[in-house]
Amino acid sequence: MTSLVQPRLVNDPFGDAGLYLDFRYARRALLFDLGDLAPLSPRKLLRVSHIFVSHAHMDHFCGFDRLLGVCLGRPLRLELFGPPGFVDRVQHKLAAYSWNLIAGNAVDFVIGVAELHGDSLARAAEFHTRDSFQRRDVAPPVIENGILLDDEECRVRAVVLDHGIPCLAFAFEEKLRINVWKDRLRRFGLPVGPWLTDLKKAVRRGEPDDTLITIPSVTPDRRSERTFPLGQLKAEVLHIEPGERIVYVVDAVYHAANAGRIVELARDADQLFIEAPFLDEDAAIAARKLHLTAAQAGSLARRAGVKRVVPFHFSPRYVAQPERLHQEVEAAFTGASAGPVGHR
Ligand SMILES: [Zn+2]
């Protein structure tokens, strides 16, 4: 079945961190981390509605300027989420420029920013082009359990990992995967049309089975509409499956608490994008730099029972031998190796 989103790493595995989730049937995308965004066209960046930044090391945040340049002058609102201190960082980025020529513009580009502290939002602010991006503090939205985004289509949850500083890891969940059996529509004499989108939304909202769904007539000469109970349409014309889960983990030191949080977040994920910067033979360096090794990443993926693991964020020291990192992740993931053996 076709997924709701198509995930793509923004850069090659040696480049800056970033994952772009493109919605297949809507002009919408989500972005995890703001490293080098050069590979993303303005058209792709303008589809982004929410951005989730793990932490503010340069290779995760330096793309903010390009995003800003592309969005300026457009009536957009972007929602950014990040770790403690993130509102200040966005404020400082915006304060680095002069805005006298666009302040007061009719078109207002707005950036909403919120910080995750533990599993709730503790600070939030808005920055409007019209105000020369002066900070306006606002009440942070009330959330539970680290759920940063929750709409009809998807949910994004974050947990805080230890990278010497707080670093967020994210799980994207498609709500339900709903496809229409076209041949059955024909059999019932039902038309294809926008009512199917409304039907899917009603299912995702969890509306009761006796909710009546109105379906327009197929024949232009007869303007009568028909109604069917939602439960009947679910059973007879829809194919419904649990949604896809995609998890994004970067920059974390390997210790029991981090490992436990990563495994819990990634449990049974369809795809786990996880950093694997160092070989396990260099585990002492990885530990000093507060990163995972490839074997550690693979063993975490195995413990979480994910279906597919995609390693990235490789250290440039292995630029001539990326296959060693891939192989080490794969061996730990499949159980072909005993997992991490180096410095813990
Ligand atoms: Zn980092």
Image (spheres, grey):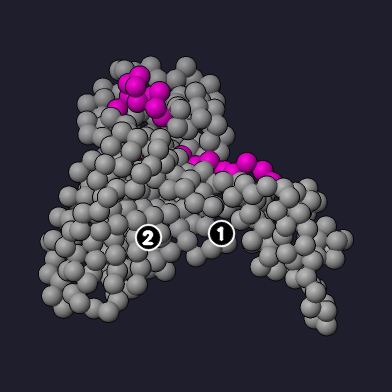
Q: Residue furthest bottom?
A: 221
Q: Mark on residue 39?
A: 2
- Residue 158: x and y in percent read 38, 39
Bounds of the magenta segment: 239-262
Residue shown at the point (21%, 54%) measured from the top left = 137
90 or 10: nearer the eye? Answer: 90
Q: Which image quadrant shows ligand 1?
A: top left
Say left or right for 240 vs 19.
right
Q: Amino acid at mark 1?
A: Arg
Q: Nearer the viewer, residue 114 or 314?
A: 114
Residue hosting label 1: 24
- Residue located 49% across and 20% down the image: 337
Query: Counting residues from the N terminus, which is met first, the one under dot 1 or under dot 2?
Result: 1
The CA distance from mark 1 to mark 2 is 19 Å
Q: Is residue 34 left or right of residue 336?
A: left
Q: Amino acid at mark 2?
A: Pro
Instruction: Look at 64% across and 49% down and name the residue there.
Output: 207
Mark 1 surroundings: few (<14), some (14-19) or many (≥20) residues within 10 A: few
Where does residue 216 sit, x and y in percent of width and height?
75, 71
Q: Residue at x 68, y 47 (%)?
A: 208
Q: Residues within 10 Å of mark 2 (few under 14, many from 20)?
A: few
The answer to which image quadrant residue 308 occupies is: top right
- Residue 194: image x %, image y %? 66, 68
